[in-house]
Amino acid sequence: MRKHHNKLYYGKYRFKTEFKMPGSLMFYPTTDEYLTKIKGKYQDTKHIIKLADFIMANRKTMKFRFQNRKVIFYSDYKKSLDLIDNFWDFWIGSKTVDPEFSDLGKNTVGCKRLPHGKFEFQVQLKKDTHNFMSENEKQNLWKFITRNKDQFKITSGPVEIFLNGKNNHLFQGYFYVKEEKYLTPVFMMVQNSIDKVIQFRKVGNGSDKKTKR
């Protein structure tokens, strides 16, 4: 029976970092020869070139796999931060797969840095958000965000143009919230549209807690 990936990499690669990256399914086989061909074929796609280069330069210090349009890396802590810095726009989560941290709960992850340096919460919207959020709810949320710009950060173009009324459809997305007290009005306005809220906490041992609310 094949070992579970988390158990397989205990001891050497204690950090699991995941990315949802367009085009990642083409990265097979993952030999240097094949990745070089991909670079030649997709010269105008920067993240594809960057991912191929990163794998070829670091394959001896990490393990990786491609699954359901996700790129999943197993590495040490320093390499996990390097991955996040290089592919920040595609990062969807990290966690420690070291049994030493098993008492922190199933949604605990390892990371020192809050998203964009200061945002503690990530509000993830439901799939096909436009089917759950009314026009009035959307307008109220957008007005609240624009009145409190220091407390919110929208990194996704589709989320922004949906909330500001320039597009009527949003198939999925998220935005960041700096302080917990701003979550309450967000829930009051668009509770039916929220899939979950991820909480990041800086902790002394170098891991973020990522908790599903």
Image (cartoon, rainbow, N blue to C red):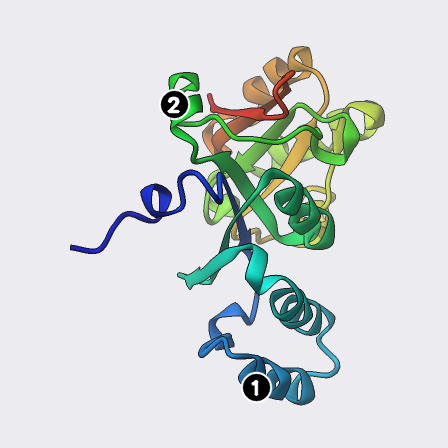
Give the mark nearer the N terminus: 2 vs 1: 1
Q: Secondary structure at mark 1?
A: helix
Residue 133 visible in the current orientation = no
Which label belongs to residue 118? none
Place of residue 205 in the rendered image (x, y in percent of width and height, measured from the top left):
61, 20
Measure how far apart labels 2 and 1 are at the Cα level. 39 Å
**Which residue appears farthest toward the left when viewing the image?**
1
Residue 3 appearing in the image: yes
| Left or right placement of residue 65 versus residue 173 in this view | left
- Give the quadrant of the N terminus: bottom left
The residue identified by callout 1 is 33
In the image, taking residue 3 as reference, residue 53 lies left or right, namely right
Q: Of 122 and 115, which appears nearest the observer?
A: 115
Residue 148 in percent (x, y) is at: 81, 23
Structural crowding at the residue carrying mark 1, measured as other residues with C-alpha within 10 Å and reported as few (<14), some (14–19) or many (≥20)? few
| The one of 191 and 18 positioned closer to us in this rendering | 18
Does 90 appear above or below 95? below
Give amino acid for label 2: Ser
Amino acid identity at mark 1: Glu
Lateral position of residue 190 relative to residue 195, left or right: right
User: Mark 2 sits on what residue?
Assistant: 102
Q: Is residue 127 left or right of residue 169?
A: left
